[in-house]
Amino acid sequence: MSREVIVQRIEKTDLIDAKKELMIEIVQNKKEDDFDKKIDRLYRQFSKSSSFKKHAEKMVCRDDEKLKICNMMLVMSVTLTLFFLKAVLFSSYVVNFSVDAIVGCLAFVFSFINVRTKYRTLKRYNLVRDFIYLDGLSLLLCILFKMFFPVQVDFSLIILLVDYYLCKKRFKEKAFKMLEAN
């Protein structure tokens, strides 16, 4: 059986996307082309092989780094967006409306891009539902704290940082569990 047939079979399975990518990567890295006798073993014993664990660790670390960067950018951009929204509601701008609007809109665009990247990465591991509640709750709390507390007491940044550390801690644990489970 050729590599292309194996890759097509892997893509049609109901495994999570991250595991499909790992299996395809390992099949592509194999030196021999004859998979006729090994196809059943490839499916049954795949997650127990050392090459799978090595590739899985690399993949999770790469995605973890991507999520860390996205989460750090989200903390900064959501904070700037919330500052702009508060300035618009209370008409107290840092410089003037146009400068604050440019910074606020750019921060919102960066937030949107990073949220999309974050959830695209989490979707590969079927972890979107686990993290969307945490992010939604932290964003709601940030908006409430930003609007109802004075500027000297800024809890929104603290909430976003707590969200960042919780996401960072939970991703590796859950990603490895998802790769081993399916």
Image (cartoon, helix red, strand yellow):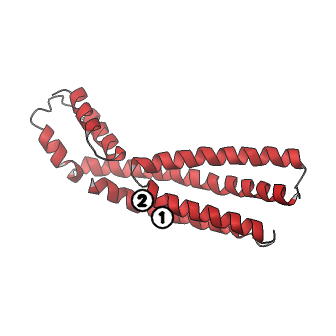
Disc 1: CA contacts within 10 A as few (<14), some (14-19) or many (>=20): few
**Picture layout, residue 17 above or below residue 145:** above
Spatial CA span between label 2 and label 1: 7 Å
The residue located at (29%, 36%) in the rendering is 11
Extreme residue in the left direction: 37
Q: Are marks 2 and 1 in contact (CB under 8 Å)?
A: yes
Give the SS element for disc 1. Answer: helix
- Please state, as top left, top right, bottom left or bottom right, where the N terminus lies in the image: top left
Q: Amino acid at mark 1?
A: Lys
The residue located at (55%, 65%) in the rendering is 165
**Picture layout, residue 99 above or below residue 160:** above
Q: Position of residue 61 (x, y in %)?
A: 43, 52
The residue located at (57%, 51%) in the rendering is 69
Residue sitting nearer the eye, 53 or 159? 159
Residue 172 tag number: 2
Residue 157 seen by the camera: no
Residue 3 tag number: none
- Which of the 4 quarters of the picture holds residue 72? bottom right
Q: Position of residue 77 (x, y in %)?
A: 69, 52
**Which residue is the site of mark 1?**
169
For residue 61, side relative to residue 13 (left or right):
right
Q: Position of residue 88 (x, y in %)?
A: 83, 55
